[in-house]
Amino acid sequence: MTPGAFMRRLLVLGLGLLALTASADTPTPPEVAARQHLLIDLASGRVLSAHEADTALDPAGATALMTAYVALGAMQDGRPARDATLAVSPRARAERRPGVPLMYATGTLRIDELLRGVAVLGARDAAVALAEGVSGSVEDFVAQMNRRALALGLSQTLFRSPTGEPASGQTSTPRELATLAARLMSEHADALPLFALRQLEHAGVRQVNPNLLLARDGSIGGLAVMASPSAGHGVVATALRDTPAGPRRLLVVLSGASSREAAAGEAQKLLNWGWQAWDAVRLYTAGQPVTSVPVWKGAANTVALGAAGALVVTVPRGDGARLQTTLTRTEPLVAPLVQGQEVGRIEVVTTGGTPVANVPLVVQQAVPLAGVLGRAWDAIRLWIR
């Protein structure tokens, strides 16, 4: 299973599904000089640290994540095509005001160029041109942004513009921004390198990506910086490293720091702690059976059961050897069975009994009904049993 497919599976289950009750031996997170933060290991979906993660904030520059998500979805559907050329309207050029990020877009530009301006700089003129080119008007684009937010289950998120400029009622939370970022990465992995570009040169102007983490850690892949009078300074950042359990991606959302430098420093502190204090352990690879059990009235006598994909858990450093797995399942299993059908649960705990994961136990291969004689014989056996 690809990292993108695995992340999509996690999103179906819901971010935080594996964020279970902390035990006495759970690593203590570092002191963080920010009002809000959330750190997730996307390899398992486990929340490693959270503070005020469901408290409202102004998404500010993180609005670029939804602007890019909607535009990329439209491009994926061919409306407009990835190589389409869009006009930079007077409304887009009117975004040129002191103190706001700009691409200095003029004339007509390819949609992927405008997307680069949004991803690298959070450029407001590029965001408006992109919105008008995708939906016909900024207002229609914003309506689409909010429809997508509801479809993603972001019930506390509301956008007022594609640019992230301060506006009454514009709101989100660290947890919902993390959900949005994870969905963007899983559905549009080819666009993620745009957010990691260190600089952008356009119209003779070279500008540096405002995400200071990109210059500090080669594993960082973007994604956005936030700054507003109400929310202070913040960052949404992801980092990917190879581990013995496979590629492991952390995601941090932080808000309410005193400066851009402080936001980057506190986010880096959380990421470093996530790498150092926690291990990702791959218990089963995608498609690997956990057990094989009898099937009644089926064309096959047994069926393999396992997790819906690779099963990775995140545990305190050194606890990987202290894990125990328990299966509960429907008994008896009677055909027909379809691939992916949930028939029980896989529970993973430490030897001390601390819950680590609880995920569906599913059928690995379909089992159709047996013939008439086979079904009749198994019916007799079940009756005797």
Image (tube, rainbow, N blue to C red):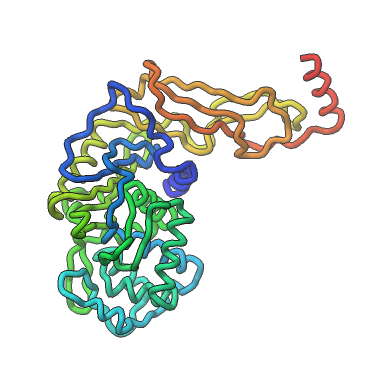
x%, y% of residue 106?
27, 82
**Residue 343 image-quadrant placement:** top right
In the visual, does 333 lie left or right of 238?
Answer: right
Q: Is residue 178 above or below residue 307?
A: below
**Residue 206 image-quadrant placement:** bottom left
Residue nearer the viewer, 101 or 243? 101
Q: Residue at x 37, y 42 (%)?
A: 42
Q: Residue at x 81, y 23 (%)?
A: 379
Hey, which residue is sitting farthest front in the picture?
168
Q: Residue at x 34, y 39 (%)?
A: 41
Can see residue 214? no
Quarter of the picture holding the C terminus: top right
x%, y% of residue 281?
37, 30
Can see residue 296? yes
Residue nearer the viewer, 274 or 281? 274
Residue nearer the viewer, 147 or 312? 147
Hey, which residue is sitting farthest top in the picture?
384
Q: Residue at x 41, y 77 (%)?
A: 137
Counting labels gives: 0
Q: Is residue 246 above or below residue 137?
A: above
x%, y% of residue 279?
31, 31
x%, y% of residue 272?
21, 39
